[in-house]
Amino acid sequence: MILVIDALNRDRFQSVIDDMFQLRARVFKDRMGWDVSVEDGRESDLFDNLDPVYLVALNDEYDVIGCNRMLQTTGPHMLTDVFQDILCGEPSLRSATIWENTRFCIDTERLKHPDSTRSVSSTACELMAGIAEYAYDSGITDVISVVDPAMDRILKRCDNAPYGYLGKTVQMGKTKALAALSDITEERIARIRNFAGITGNIFADEDEVAEALAARTAEEMMSPDLRDYCDEQIAAATTEHEKRAALALRAALAQTSRSRSDIRA
Amino acid sequence: MHKRIDLIDLAGIPEVQRDYVGHLNKLCDTLGVEHATYFAANPISGKMHGFTTYPDDWKSHYVAHRLQEYDPTLNSASRSVAPVDWRRLTSDPEYDRVFKDAHDFKLPSQGVTVPIRGMFGEIGLLCACSSVPQAEWIKLKRDILGSLLNNAVHLHDTVMNSDPLLKTLRQPKLSSREIEILQWVAAGKSQQDIGDILMISSRTVEVHMRSTREKLCTISTAQAVGRAVSLGLIQPG
């Protein structure tokens, strides 16, 4: 599922933002060797302070498995600044109906783990469909995406090929970077969805995610003994009824420890 | 597809004759919305620019109660990248303070704010509202969103360029690709021809022309050619 986070709801999703900055540090600093600033295992830059909008891909456990950042091209954005080399020092495109995508990445390590129920390609497609649909609903008709050649190949493979490129491909760290142009149309959305077999709504309900994250935090705050006991009960359940009861017990106990910690706070 | 509604040219009118409220009234008629508001602050002087088609009694009430300091359609919405439907603002702590009063003045509670970020990080806001039934509003909004975006940036650039200092700082910066394409347009070539000549897709030509028009604060490509010639950016065709 795709969660949209911007300045209006960011306060509710600090933990997701924090996970995302950690993923970005692993991808852009460790794997791609880009010259990005990482502090305490988290990558962020000045554009993160300009109220961008993030599209974050989450798995069923609400872990961050992919992300992307979007900015208007009428105001400050990366191609006018740190990615200027790509445009050979030339001014960038500027239009109210063109947005810029940066920091597109997927948590390939997590997704390639044998326990993962999702694949790298399905997550990339879901995120790409999310970007196209969110931009489309916002009246945007084209996006510029700064990507590395591996991501560019993924775009092409997923029937989401760019229609053009800006400037040139430049060396960046251990890899290269380029600026791809994509139209935002119903046809493109249909192609991505069709390729990945996506049907129905892919956007997460904000309130549901916030509630689930709060419940997860509460569970993490339960004493280890109590948590082990709950997990055993859930594992030992032999019928659906028993399993539901064991899950409800864990949620109720978590809720109790959450309210107790609220009082403490 | 988004419905294409023509822009109303504002930059072409001499500054002293510019009637921003009249412009917004015309915009309302063209787009089929009830009221429209434009709001921005000059990034250098801090001067506020606000124009609206709202009735005078609401304007007086709004100013007297300093509602602009609380209004989520301005404050919260200005921090969004995407246009904000006012439904999203109902959980804003200041929502009731403004919308209860607006309701008493029989003004629509249904609307959208289109935030435009300017080149100095300043933000211009174009708001439009309507009291048609919700299903109709959703459809109307979808149809006019592209047009609202284009009008918002045009209005914002025109207002910002009316400040002599900002106008100097905001000299249009075209890339050599944009200039090259515009020079071919001036020579009478079609979008497809230019794509073939430069070996790029026709849509790549189109986004460059769109960007050029917006940078030059013009509506039509013909106007952009004219302005670029007068600025000495290209040779007459």
Image (cartoon, coloured by chain):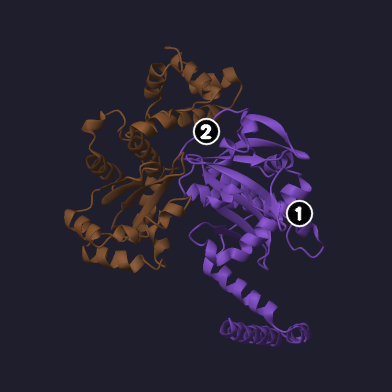
Chain colours: A purple, B brown
Task: Out of A203 and A252, give the one closest to the viewer.
Answer: A252
Q: Residues within 10 Å of mark 1 (few under 14, many from 20)?
A: some
Q: Secondary structure at mark 1?
A: helix
Image coordinates of residue B176 in percent, x first then y, are 55, 22
Residue occupying image coordinates x 24% and y 59%: B62
CA gap, disc 2 and disc 1: 32 Å
Image coordinates of residue A210 in percent, x first then y, are 56, 70
Q: Residue furthest right?
A: A114
Left-right relation of B134 to A164: left
Vertical position of residue A148 compared to residue A212: above or below: above
Vertical position of residue A175 compared to residue B71: above or below: above
Choose top left, top right, bottom left or bottom right for residue B218: top left
Residue occupying image coordinates x 46% and y 16%: B234
Q: Can you say which quadrant of the picture contains the N terminus of chain A? A: bottom right
Host chain of mark 1: A
Residue topped by disc 2: A93
Q: Can you say which quadrant of the picture contains the C terminus of chain A? A: bottom right
Left-right relation of B141 to A242: left
**Total residue callouts:** 2
Image coordinates of residue A229 in percent, x first then y, are 76, 87
Residue topped by disc 1: A108
Asked whether residue A193 is in view, the answer is no
Q: Earlier in the sequence, mark 2 or mark 1?
A: 2
**Given this view, does label 2 or label 1 mark the residue nearer the observer?**
2
Q: Secondary structure at mark 2?
A: loop
